[in-house]
Amino acid sequence: MKQVVQNYKSGELAVLDVPVPGCKPGGVLVRSAFSLISTGTELMKVSEAGMSMLGKARSRPDQVAKVMQSVATNGVPATYRKVMGKLDSYTPLGYSLCGVVEQVGAGIDDVKVGDLVACAGNEHALHAELNWVPKNLYTPVPDGLAPRHAAFGTVGSIALQGVRQGESRLGEVALVIGLGLIGQLVVQLLTASGVRVVGVDPDPVRCELAERLGAAACGDPESSAVEASVAELTGGHGVDQVYLAAGGGSNQPVELAARLCRDRGRVVDIGKCRLDLPWNAYYEKELDVRFSRSYGPGRYDPEYELEGRDYPIGYVRWTERRNLACFLDLVARGGVDVEPLISHVADFDDAVETYRSLKEGDLKAVAVLFRYPGQGVEAQAPAVAVPSVNVRPSPVRAARTPVRLAFVGAGNYATSMLLPHLAQRDGVELSTVVTTTALSATNAQRKFGFAGATTDLDSVLGDKSVDAVFVVTRHSSHAELTRKALLAGKAVFVEKPLALSEDELAGVLAAVEESGNDRLQVGFNRRFAPLLREAGTRFGARTGPASLRYLVNAGRLDHGSWYLQQGTEGSRFAGEGGHFIDTASWLLGADPVSVYAITTPGNEDLQILLRYPDGSTATVSYVTTGSPGFPKETLDMVADGKVLRLDDFVRASVYGSKRWVSSRLPKARDKGQNAELAAFVKAVRTGGPMPVPLESLVATTAATLAVQASLAGGAPVTLARTR
């Protein structure tokens, strides 16, 4: 098998062929799927190995002290031979991975061959194809958690143990100094605990990331903004806890901790930074300085780690293994999101080059994963199902006017993009608006002329005079509200997304089959945009495959936007990405058969490649780091010697044997909402086909879900049609 090793004397890094470890009693043999590079601890070891002997001695005074003790005991020659022999040996790297159990040792009954486990330990969870891992250093991965996310288990446990040492309490304010991998996880764990967090790091990209993941404010340690934020959040008293997650030789972190901590506050050291405590500052505030020992109780205890002797839960609630399981559970339930921390996924065979890029600064990363051959790709990136729709539609009502509509939700999109069109449309009656707060329903009723306003959804679904229900709520509720409305026999218009998971999508289709009601439309309005439709007509029919490029200059969201609540509302792309996939599929005249997605290191920029049955491809570039002055959406399609160009729904052109360009005069940007609503109302009024076939809505939703599956598995995902 192959393993990453380093010679501490020469600094050489290599991927060596080494023997497969034996499967000893009390543990399991694990084949790695993903292992995580600790960009703090491991890079420090790699950097130290490249130093001169004097530099090594200066960086590790603890080891120098051991050498001097050996000299006093054994003499210089024996000590020299011992030290040189140890330095001139290959040592392993790595301590956090996820893999599949390949063999079970005697005495193990909690996992079996084929189970997915997360593993810890700098002697057992190495960057190697196979590792033997003792019982207390692995834990089963919760169902549904992606292997690449489970590979964060060890570093997550380190962060979790640090937070436990801080004894955080609901409503407190904490300062996290150092926003690297551990610091980012500490920010999320504290936020999940109801603690408001201020972050400190000289890197503005890491500060921005921490704010996206829940920090109230972040800034440079030299900036007065950090002190101002602490003063505002604490009423001038100072933070309750400080977490030192920084590295390096500067004493600035402990000095900043003393300055910004309240009287009798707690300072927890998690990282490895200089700790020359300014005596007066710490004494006068009587600060409680605590150390967090790695993954938790059991660390460095050979009876616990190697012999599998657990500590009784009544005496030690959170051990290494229980911390590991707890962190994975938090990630699986959405309490912690590790996906934004992944800057790069490298093939295991490229390990040496990856370390070189990290060391030299060519690759700037928070977290980097190694992906192993045969794991985390074909085996760990399963196809996303595109369920077939097996339904015998129930008879629709006879055509009649007016069409009576009810709205569930009256937020910004509903009141700015949908209701103004419907309120002015002949043959439409706005029946009832339903919101969770009485005042918002009353405001919508007053502004748009609804006949009634209520907070009782069931009363609307039970009203036989209501023909159609619009679901315009937050993303997490779309699937369930759609399901209820379909079962009540209503035509449904649901804003994107239709569903945030395969289970939610299956639930909607189960309601269609149970009720025989397939009268469903999702708000994919761009295919109805007049300018795009005219350009498509000018382009004409295709005879060969097409290449389509769609650039979405999405921009950054304001801090606090509910779109950032990924644990409950899904990712930002999951919420609106269906728009762009649907538009591409409509232009190409088919549904995609595979999806491959990658993310740009350090931000949310996505590159998504869609493949279609005839060989056509569509690339969706969804970026948040562009200039707000550049158009939001630009699209190009190339095929058969022709090019179609769309500039943000205000100008279009087609290049072929003849050139067509839309009017150069400024016009209102029309993304198709009015035409889409007209088509939906007509279908409800006449009983005719819905504007978009249900099969297409399902395929677009499945493709959108496949983006996250591809990111998690690091490979293309097949869209598998089910029967």
Image (spheres, grey):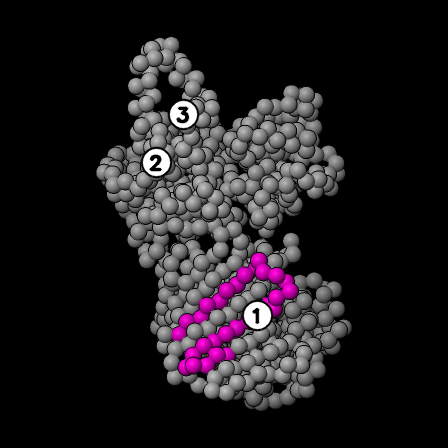
Residue 195 visible in the picture: no
Q: Position of residue 529 (x, y in %)?
A: 58, 79
Displayed quadrant of residue 54: top left
**Residue, disc 3:** 53
Residue 58 visible in the picture: yes
The residue drawn where x is 47% and y is 76% is: 637
Q: What amino acid is found at the position of numbered circle 2 in the picture?
A: Glu
Camera-nearest residue between 566 and 583: 583
Q: Which badge, 1 or 2, is on the more N-terminal residue?
A: 2
Query: Measured along the vertical axis of the image, is residue 654 above or below residue 548?
Result: below
Q: Nearer the viewer, mark 1 or mark 3?
A: 3
Q: Which disc number belongs to residue 12?
A: 2
Dot 3: element:
helix
Q: CA distance from mark 3 to mark 2?
A: 15 Å
Q: Which disc number belongs to residue 633?
A: 1
Range covered by the magenta-colored residues: 616-644
Q: What amino acid is found at the position of numbered circle 3 in the picture?
A: Met
The residue drawn where x is 52% and y is 63% is: 622
Q: Nearer the viewer, mark 1 or mark 2?
A: 2
Q: Residues within 10 Å of mark 2 (few under 14, many from 20)?
A: some
The residue drawn where x is 38% and y is 63% is: 717
